[in-house]
Amino acid sequence: MLNITDWTIIGIALAAATIALLFLRPQTNSRDLSRLRDLRLQAEQEQRQSAEWISTLKQAAEQADTWSEQAKRHTQNIELYEAKCQAHCEESKELLEQLRTQVSTIDPLHSSSMSNPHLDQAPANQSVQDVADEIIYGVKDEVIHSIKN
């Protein structure tokens, strides 16, 4: 059995171990705690800012994609419109050439004045000139109307 001396030695050893643990433990004071708290709050704030920036960048990227698609569609519409205008222009040129050919077979004097508009030669048949003018203005109106549509 243990006598009183043994219990005293065990008690002193336990007290020494407890005191040693208290001294070896890192000392924290209120200054360190407040610095740690400030660092944690700053890290949380930076994390929120980063999340906001990422969200803003994501929205900007989506908007840029939308604008890019709109620009592509607009470009395609312009190209189609240009092709349509070019086709109408070619068609008008062909019709005008056919008209000039027909007028030249009907009235050679008038065809020379059509090829050179600075000549003041009166056509032999005024009704041919009127018909030609009506056809030209009709074709012009059709081309303008089809381009607008």
Image: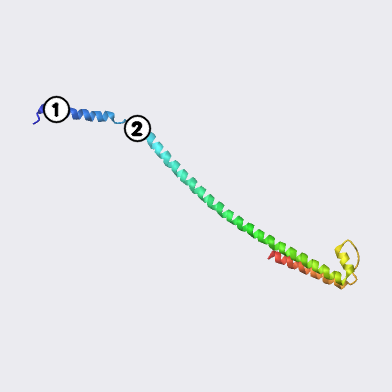
Quadrant including the N terminus: top left
Q: Earlier in the sequence, mark 2 or mark 1?
A: 1
Using the rendered image of the protein, determine whether residue 129 is visible from the camera's viewpoint: no
Callout 2 amino acid: Ser
Give the label on residue 117, or none.
none
Using the rendered image of the protein, determine whether residue 68 is visible from the camera's viewpoint: yes
Residue occupying image coordinates x 10% and y 28%? 4
Q: In the depicted view, which residue is nearer to us: 29 or 55?
A: 55
Mark 2 surroundings within 10 Å by alpha-carbon count, few (fewer than 14), some (14 through 19), many (20 or more): few
In the orientation shown, which residue stands out farthest toward the left?
Answer: 1
Q: Is residue 88 above or below residue 71?
A: below
Which residue is the site of mark 2?
30
Label 1 sits on a secondary structure element that is helix
Percent across and percent down for residue 124 are 90, 71
Residue occupying image coordinates x 14% and y 27%? 8
Residue occupying image coordinates x 74% and y 64%? 90
Callout 1 amino acid: Thr
| Label total for image | 2
Percent across and percent down for residue 141 are 75, 67
* Left or right placement of residue 132 versus residue 3 in this view: right
Give the label on residue 8, or none.
1
Q: In the depicted view, which residue is nearer to us: 101 or 126?
A: 101
Quadrant including the C terminus: bottom right
Image quadrant where residue 44 sits: top left
Percent across and percent down for residue 72 are 61, 56
Q: Is residue 147 above or below residue 46?
A: below
